[in-house]
Amino acid sequence: MTTHSVEDIKSESKRLRGALLDSLADPLTGALREDDTTVIKYHGSYQQDDRDLRDERRRQKLEPAYQFMIRTRTPGGVVTPQQWLKLDAIATRYSNHSLRITTRQAFQFHGVIKRELKATMQAINATLIDTLAACGDVNRNVMVAANPLESAAHAEVQDWAAKLSRHFLPNSRAYYEIWLDEELVAGSGEEEEPIYGSTYLPRKFKVAFAVPPVNDVDVFANDLGFIAVIEDGALAGFNVSIGGGMGASHGDAETYPRVANVVGFVTPDQVIAVATAVVTTQRDRGNRAVRKRARFKYTIDDHGLDAIVAEIESRAGFALAPARAFRFEHSGDRYGWVQGEDGHWHLTLHLSAGRIADRPGAPHLTGLREIANVHRGEFRMTPNQNLVIAGVPDSERKRIDALVHSHALDAGLRNGTALARAALACVALPTCGLAMAEAERYLPDFTGKLEPLLDKHGLRDAPILLRISGCPNGCSRPYLGEIALVGKAPGRYNLMLGADHRGQRLNTLYRENIAESEILDALDPLFARYAGERETDEGFGDFLHRSGVVALPPYPTHRQIPLELHP
Ligand code: SRM
Ligand code: SF4
């Protein structure tokens, strides 16, 4: 059997249909046909297998325990309580009894088997949420700052994100035919794709909207960023950033993380035009011959920033205005209750690595179901894998608090260190096929091991940013962590240090391929120095730079946002 390139599979997919109907109908295997494992991504699903069971299944001469991950398209991570209840029912009925909040404000279901895939997709659709384009070489889930304090302007930003998300949906009816039994009409499989064309984008594409002073979306890790400029409470427009990305491969200097360049300012009514110009520039200029160099960040580095900006302006039909000053203070979530300008309250809960499940002493899935039963506002997933119970009237706060407490949903806030509360970890094992080491499952162990060290140095409340990824693809945006562990092999990680806490500077490799005891040994003296020598309000990453422990990483291009843009 010949293996097709991803470019061939896309162009021969009949607008994302492939042979999915046949693959799904085949009762002899829990897997899809090989090409369809690519096609299904555009429908928001990945074929995976349970890696914990691999060896045993091999011994028993069984095929791997194939299962599917499904990811929602939820711009800004907003869902209603009614939707929450339905998603919870799907997690319990079809998936592994958990909901997983991702680093891009979506839900993931894990462990869905092939013969229940269609029913699961239909159930998700019945919630009025879809999974279209949640994965694949298209625009992914659009992120929006979860901090809703500037209520009116924030709602406007959320609105632009939702518009952009719709604007960049593939034009194909494949999703509706395959999962929702929509009848075939003339032209099925040959729909016009005015934005994407028949080979879609060279690679995944990511957009985020940030609302300063909070950079919770890590806007500079995105291919395209919009940084809201709010003047006197009203949205004046957005600074535009291009060329961010995290993914890299170990030992391959051709691949590297990159923070985006801020290239100008647009008014709200220019957002769709400039985004379309950026996406089509990447569609036509991106490297389709070498997939690992196909992200927009490499297109920019290969063609030059000025040439790419000129092309964007020419496609958009207008010049970008000069970027306006902006200032980010941090990229984390602020926990607990805050009151928005419209008087409603918002409660941010900490959920370790975004996993919502019922565990002994921590029935979080049940607790959030109970809250969804009484809550009348909305739920907002944060890009830090946490959850905001948003839009609560004063009169309802007590009731929500009681449910939060009785289901230990506040355990993460009451116990542990500030570092543990700020930490992110990608999914990794057992579902991620690319994982080299544990991440989500290791996070509580590792933060538990750091706790005595932090206590020893009086750093329990220091909000140091820790990020763990099971491989260098960087799904927890590790290269923007003040401390990051990037998986190399089971139990072994690259220790990266020195990003800032505003998402504006990349970290640097400090020790390569080391085990836990060596990581703790490396961090202990640095915590000691930080505790003794830091300046007021100085972050750990900033301290490591000032004290010369680390320098900027030796990547060829953008490693930190120019300082002159900070007022
Ligand atoms: Fe990711 C691939 C999980 C955010 C960079 N990512 C994967 C896959 C689908 C593995 C695969 O291809 O087989 C992972 C599925 C694991 C599982 O079992 O669920 C996976 N990525 C995730 C999530 C769930 C991590 C999490 O713990 O929350 C995030 C889902 C986001 C969403 O809702 O859309 C997730 N991935 C990210 C981010 C962070 C972001 O976008 O802000 C990045 C870095 C930013 C970037 O794109 O540059 C990221 N994921 C990657 C890459 C490297 C891409 C590259 O440019 O090289 C891969 C591998 C690939 O695409 O080949 C990847
Ligand atoms: Fe999987 Fe690697 Fe992404 Fe973690 S960083 S989810 S291990 S692809």
Image (cartoon, rainbow, N blue to C red):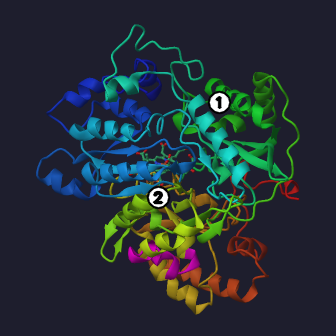
Q: Which residues are magenta?
A: 404-419
Q: In front: 330, or 369?
A: 369
In the rendered image, the vertical position of residue 537 relative to residue 376, given as above or below: below
Give how far apart the Cα atoms at labels 2 and 1 are. 27 Å
348 relative to 136, above or below:
below
> Which residue is located at x 55 percent, y 43 percent?
75
Q: Which mark is residue 426?
A: 2
Mark closer to the chain start, 2 or 1:
1
| Residue with the mark numbered 1 | 279
Measured from the top left, where is residue 173 in percent x and y? 42, 21
Residue 423, numbered label: none
* Percent x, y of residue 315: 75, 22
The three-letter amino acid code for the residue at tag 1 is: Val
Crowd class of label 2 (few under 14; some 14 to 19; many from 20; radius 10 Å): many
Answer with left or right where residue 190 lies relative to residue 531: left
Question: Which residue is more in the foreground, 461 or 522?
Answer: 461
409 in magenta: yes
- Categorize mark 1 by other alpha carbons within 10 Å: few (<14), some (14-19), many (20+): many
Q: Is mark 2 within 8 Å of ligand 2?
A: yes
